[in-house]
Image (cartoon, rainbow, N blue to C red):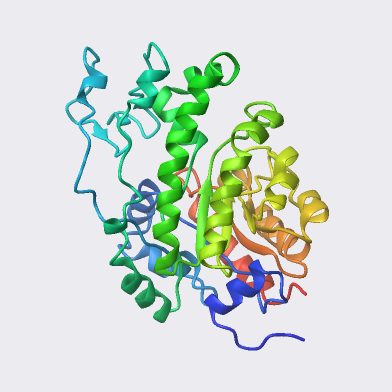
Amino acid sequence: MSAVNLSYRENFFRAMRRRDPEFVPFTYVFTGALVAKLRQETGRADIERSLESRFYHARNGLRKVVAEPTKNMNDYSKYYSGRNLSADAIVSEWGVAHQPDGYMHCESPLADISGIHDIENYPAPDLGRPYRWQNKKAEVDALHAGGFIVKGDTISTYETARSLRGPENFLVDIYENRLWCEALIEKIFNVNMERIENMVPTGIDVLFLGDDVGAQQSMMFAPQIWRDLFKPRFRSYIALAKKINPEILVFYHSDGNIFDIIPDLIEIGLDILNPVQPECMDPLLVKKEFGKHLSFWGTIGTQTTMPFGSVADVKGAAKKMIAEVGRGGGLCLAPTHVLEPDVPLKNIKALIEAVEEYGKAYR
């Protein structure tokens, strides 16, 4: 039976649980650089608000609640002794230094180690301590009252390890220094379990898990390595979250082609897969193979369609995904990445117009 007059929040849960939603949920996010570009092009300081979908609550349907700032920041300075670290570098709670000359340029504190003891003695942050989450339930409740869907901090394992050790070093460790690799992953895992234990009781709706383990055509490493090193940890994350709140939805993000491990993600209890890049995996095939057990968030390409497609291309892609991947529920339509300055305004408008035209008539 068709649902009638659902709120965005109610409809989102119907869609993600594949229970005959009234319309296809839709969301998107701009980078700050794109906002600045659009403001300059249009002369409108309120350009983001002016683009809001009339029907779908668009960008602002999802809100994030984060932990309180730490009271116990570790001193990681000794790990950068002798390195050319900028005075403006921002050091994360894990001790990873982000240089100001690029979003992805970071310095890894464990890049040069001599043994497993260096990993075992490395100071872990207090990201999961109860004091950092004990006042967050009221914040979540207020957002729920406003009709928002709420997520917490994203839980990563491979990406955190890669940042701490350095991408090349960590990939070598996987094959040649497995004890080092396991020790680092276990340290991260223990912190993440404590984060989930204290984050989920605040009432968040969606637990965001994320690790970019996919490349353009295949995984970053053999699927069996993911099964050996990461699957047991993610199984524990999901089991703990659902033990605390059986109704919570679990979302997993990985760019690239991760087709080989989708059955594993379903097995361990995943609810939502993101972003299903059409340049890497065919969303229609993914829906056909796994749509009975899994929902999808994304599917609109940001490597191709959004920056380089025509208005007709954008509208055609959205219509197709709504009709095929959205069939029977299981789709939150979105670009597969934050929208960057190479995306023209006309294509953003085309995506919104397509959702408004086709999103309520997909059945």
Q: Residue furthest left?
A: 87
The spot of residue 358 in percent (x, y) is 69, 71
Whole-percent x, y for residue 326 in the image: 72, 65
Question: Residue 101 location, x and y as percent?
Answer: 30, 28
Any part of residue 335 in sight: no
For the point 74% across and 85% down, the residue is 2
Image spot of residue 233 (x, y percent): 56, 42
Asked if 245 appears above or below 277 in the picture, the reply is: below
Q: Is residue 316 left or right of residue 74?
A: right
Q: Nearer the viewer, residue 347 or 244?
A: 244
Q: Is residue 329 above or below residue 133?
A: below
Choose between 249 and 331: the one closer to the eye.
Answer: 249
Q: In the visual, does 320 lie left or right of 77? A: right
Which residue sits furthest bottom? 4
Identify the image quadrant of the N terminus: bottom right
| Residue drawn 30% across the image and 45% down it | 126
Q: Which corner quadrant of the image does residue 220 belong to?
A: top right
Quarter where residue 264 is shown: top right
Residue at x 58% of width, y 68% of height: 246
Q: Is residue 44 left or right of residue 334?
A: left
Quadrant containing the C terminus is: bottom right
> What count of labels does the image hold?
0
Q: Is residue 160 visible?
A: yes
Asked if residue 2 is positioned above or below residue 217 in the image, the reply reads below
